[in-house]
Image (cartoon, helix red, strand yellow):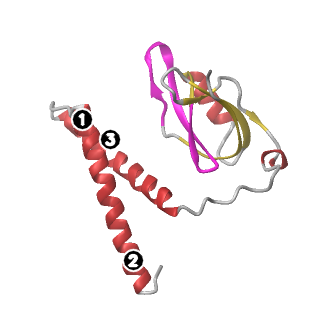
Amino acid sequence: MTERKTIKGEIEGWGREPNKFKGGRGSLGIKVEGEWHNLLGKLETLEKVQKEFPKGSIVQFEEEENKRGYLDIVEDSIKKIEKAEAYEGGIKQPSGDRKDKDYVTCFMAAVDVIVIKIAYSFRKNKPLSAFEITNETMQMTEQLYLDYQKVKEKLKREGKW
């Protein structure tokens, strides 16, 4: 049985560009209430949905588990709703687990660097393997996170944090 759940909240952002698949389809990330969700569909539809529901929109949509076990937004399930409807039990408080958010931020920064490195490797006609990309991304994420923690502690000691 596939898992299905309803998501409600404010759109905090969209992915930069859709990941393109064969046949004019693709996927696009949408960040709602601090979590990323995956929207699949025709490229034209993804662009239309992104314009129809800009950052700051209060929305509701359904997610369903795909064959590989990941959750994807059910096509045509995104709709605008009122703020009171999205936050029936009051506004969701942050989990307080800042560590996870900091690590995700470092991961996203590492991915940005790796994307540039991949493009450079193609220009030099020496494409990186999937293993190299994954390995470098994770190593860079860990290093960025450790460096971030060191700087944060230093700033706290100096009373600047």
Nearest the viewer among 31 and 143 is 143
> Could you tell me which residue is drawn at 22 percent across and 38 percent down?
132
What type is the residue that disc 3 sits on? Val
Circle 1 sits on which residue?
131
Other residues around mark 1 within 10 Å, as few (<14) / some (14–19) / many (≥20): few
Q: How many numbered badges does the structure rendering display? A: 3
Whether residue 54 appears in magenta in the rendering, the answer is no
Q: Is residue 66 above or below residue 158?
A: above
* Magenta region, residue range: 17-38
> Could you tell me which residue is drawn at 29 percent across and 40 percent down?
134
Circle 2 sits on which residue?
153
> What secondary structure is the magenta-colored segment mainly?
strand
> On the rendered structure, is 105 left or right of 57?
left
Q: Quadrant of residue 135?
A: top left
Q: Is residue 150 above or below residue 158?
A: above
Residue 89's x, y, as percent?
A: 81, 52
Circle 3 sits on which residue?
115
Q: Helix, strand or loop at disc 3?
A: helix
Q: Residue furthest top?
A: 23
What type is the residue that disc 2 sits on? Glu
Q: Reading the chain from its start, which is encountered first: label 1 or label 2?
A: 1
Q: Helix, strand or loop at disc 2?
A: helix
Whether residue 28 appears in magenta in the rendering, the answer is yes
Quarter holding the N terminus is top right
> Could you tell me which residue is drawn at 39 percent across and 55 percent down?
106
Q: Reading the chain from its start, which is encountered first: label 3 or label 1?
A: 3
